Image: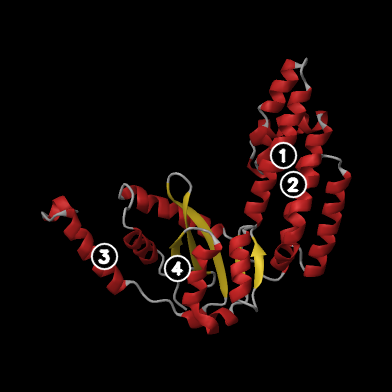
Amino acid sequence: MAELVGLHWHTVKAIDHRRLRRETAPADLTRVRHLIMDEFALHKGHHYATVAICADTQQVLWIGEGRSRTAVRPFFEWLGRDTCHQIEAVAMDVNMAMDLEAKQHCPNARIVYDLFHVVAKFGREVIDRVRVDQANRLHEDRAGRRVIKRSRWLLLRNRANLAPEQTVKLDELLAANEPLTTVYLLKSQLKELWYAPSEAEARRRWKEWFGMAILSGLKPLMAFAKRLRPYLEGIVASALYRLNTSVLEGMNNRIKVIKRMAYGYRDTTYFFLKIKAAFPGRMR
């Protein structure tokens, strides 16, 4: 753009910055009842930003650097006491920082933990660990060890997304290895907690799932179940509030495109304005 109009890029940026501040619509906080919060990579090297949207309008309300309690606190202070008290639910990853800050500022809100993030953690911490353990047991069966080591994506992907020949390989693998069968089935059953028709049914499903996890005798599975137990209320709440962070996942992909088109942004204030302008939300 700078080359096209014959101006220095600093000048073009300053003009665009003023335009964004003038044209970006302010959030109508009276409509905010349900929030979705997530993080995205701001720079390489584990530098993150937190983004919060209104779940009902999908408008980006706020973006801030960091993902700690201190980092997200300005968002709730910006919302103000009246808006915070009208919030009914906040969807997020299993993130103790966001969780505690949301509970402190929004006393009437239920925390809803996102299914995708929990299942992804299960894949990394349980399925991958059990798969590696099972492969390591087959010291003398090189062919069998190789099959298990190469089965990661078969075990992590949804069955519905597998090609017919991959489904056959998965079934053969599960039939030959009981621990892998156990964690694979419990992954599927874990998802059902988020689709319970009522909170009472969600609690019943949790009790059943937790019991099977503990009785499995598989240390990674048992440890995961015990770590997940303190977050039960945020899982059960999904029966009442069908919220998840998938909308933000899609937004994060577009944010990456915005960042890539400019080869990155050194001015985060300007970058955040670009994001807000890209997601103005739906009208009534």
- From the viewer's perspective, is 90 left or right of 19? right
Looking at the rendered structure, the kind of residue marked 2 is Lys
Question: Marks 4 and 1, how far apart in space?
Answer: 36 Å
Residue placed under numbered mark 3 in the picture: 17
Q: Earlier in the sequence, mark 3 or mark 1?
A: 3
Q: Earlier in the sequence, mark 3 or mark 4?
A: 3
Which residue is painted at 75% across and 35% down in the image?
130
Residue placed under numbered mark 1 in the picture: 127
Classify 10 Å Cα crowding around label 1: few (below 14), some (14-19), many (20 and above): many
Residue placed under numbered mark 4 in the picture: 62
Query: Nearest the camera: 85 or 244?
Result: 85
Q: Earlier in the sequence, mark 4 or mark 2?
A: 4
- From the viewer's perspective, is 26 left or right of 237? left
User: Disc 2 vs disc 3: Cβ atoms closer than 8 Å?
Assistant: no
User: Disc 1 vs disc 2: Cβ atoms closer than 8 Å?
Assistant: yes
40 up-or-down from 112: above or below: above
User: Disc 3 vs disc 4: Cβ atoms closer than 8 Å?
Assistant: no
The location of residue 134, given as percent across then percent down, is 77, 29
Which SS class for mark 2?
A: helix
Which SS class for mark 3?
A: helix
Q: Nearer the viewer, mark 1 or mark 2?
A: 1
Question: Marks 3 and 1, how far apart in space?
Answer: 47 Å
